[in-house]
Image (tube, rainbow, N blue to C red):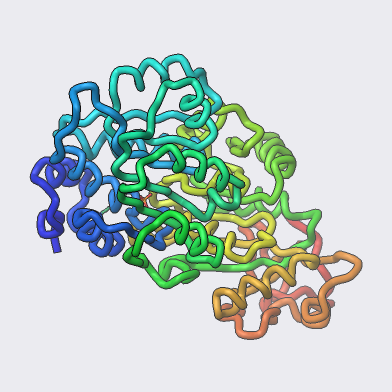
Amino acid sequence: MSFKDLGLSDALVKAVKEKGYTTPSPIQEKAIPHILAGKDVLASAQTGTGKTAGFTLPVLQYLSETKHPKYRPLRALVLTPTRELAAQVYDNVREYSSYLNIHSAVVFGGVKAASQIATLRRGVDILVATPGRLLDLHDQKAVSFKRIDVLILDEADRMLDMGFVRDINKIISFMPAKRQNLMFSATFSKDIKQLAQGILRNPVMVEAEPENSTAEMVTQKAYQVDKNKKTEVVTNLIKNGNWNQVLIFMRTKHGANKLTKKLLQSGISAAAIHGNKSQGARTKALSNFKTNDIRVLVATDIAARGLDIPLLPHVINFELPNIPEDYVHRIGRTGRAGASGEAISLVCSEETEYQREIEKLLGKKLSTEIIEGYEPTDNAPPKRAATQTKGSFNKNTSGGNKSKKKPHFKGNKPSSPSGRGRTGAPKKKRY
Ligand code: AMP
């Protein structure tokens, strides 16, 4: 199957070729023909599946083939949960429309509205936007939704999580009832289905891959560690493994700042990306990370969602997410586009329940190991970890683990050939 076979025009096929895509991804193959046919589509697809081209290409084709008044009323709107995702989607729109007479723009908060208003006044066919700023601009009469033909909700599940439902419904209330609706979401939860019911009409459902399945190419590992030693473990993994592009997930903004500071102190270039950072700081952190000017990006779940970081080799869960689905989203950042990747989770005793929840969702156990010298030493270790850790470091600790190898950082060689200390007691760190 080629892009041409999907019914895309020569101008779009040319633009796609220039991006280096040879064949459509599964979600593109499944969604594009329906979108071209004018149907409403509810698609389950995460970032990394090629979903953006999946909706952008057919919508651009529609816009370029239909007549419109000279003043170019807004005809297609893409709503995204985060500013970064809006910027990325817009970059894609611009690239794919290189050979089309299409005007596009992006608007999001955190930056001045004046230039956005000026751009909108000049006439825009397709707009990418975050809901809050878009409503502000609508209140200021800088944009109208009266001529919208296509509405696209990207990462709809995250928009729900971020509390955008009211904004979305308000925006929709200004649109004509007759329009095409496309909804992309990483999961098909009950809430998403409910939101979809209110917006989509007889949607075709397409799925990029089975719900909650994790990329085949991703090696997933959990290290049981002492909570207070996580920073040291991360620093050593990065330094000794010579890792140059690492995405680290934290549960809180404060935690992200703290870890970033510690990494910088130990000579590892890093930046944090979360909701309290200014738009300028977020954009700069992401671009420095993509160009390898910094080694580590420390992110919260919401800030990281939807970031397009191709071929990311390492993802570390500094803390396990308390929502199991977030684990799947996090590790979806590695092993993308056929490249292999590694996702490592640092699990302290109080997080073992989270690990069990994640394993339940995945339908498999994570390969779990203990790093010598960093064993969980919390006062109330979980039952299984406690009994198996004692004097038997090499034992698996979550039942069906694949690997029995105990990891050693470089320079932290075991003192006995078996890799076990003479007494089996926690070893002194040797970095
Ligand atoms: P997305 O899921 O839309 O964020 O896309 C993930 C990455 O895949 C982006 O870097 C795209 O440029 C890239 N991509 C999209 N479609 C294809 C394709 N058909 N072949 C190869 N790469 C693609």
- Residue lying at the far right of the rendered structure: 379
Q: Is 265 drawn above or below residue 379 in the view shown?
A: above
Q: How many labels does the image show?
A: 0
Location of the N terminus (image quadrant): bottom left
In the image, 86 versus 368, the foreground residue is 86
Residue 266 seen from this side: no
Residue 267 percent location from the top left of the image? 64, 36
Instruction: Tell whether 410 sits left or right of 314.
Output: right
Residue name at image x 60 percent, y 47 percent: 162
Residue at left offset 34%, top offset 28%? 105
Viewer-closest of 288 and 240: 288
Q: For residue 274, which quarter of the picture?
A: top right
- On the image, the x and y values in percent for residue 375 come to 78, 66
| 88 versus 379 height, above or below | above
235 over 392 or under it: above or below: above
Does residue 160 appear left or right of residue 104 in this picture?
A: right
Tell me the quarter of the picture where residue 132 sits: top right
Q: Residue at x 50, y 37 (%)?
A: 131
Q: Residue furthest left?
A: 10
Residue 17, can we see it? yes
- Could you tell me residue 192's position as x and y percent? 51, 60
Q: From the top left corner, tell me how far across and down residue 7 is, in percent.
A: 12, 55
The residue lying furthest to the bottom in this view is 399
- Which residue is painted at 40% across and 54% down in the image? 183
User: In the shown orientation, is residue 341 left or right of residue 402?
Assistant: left
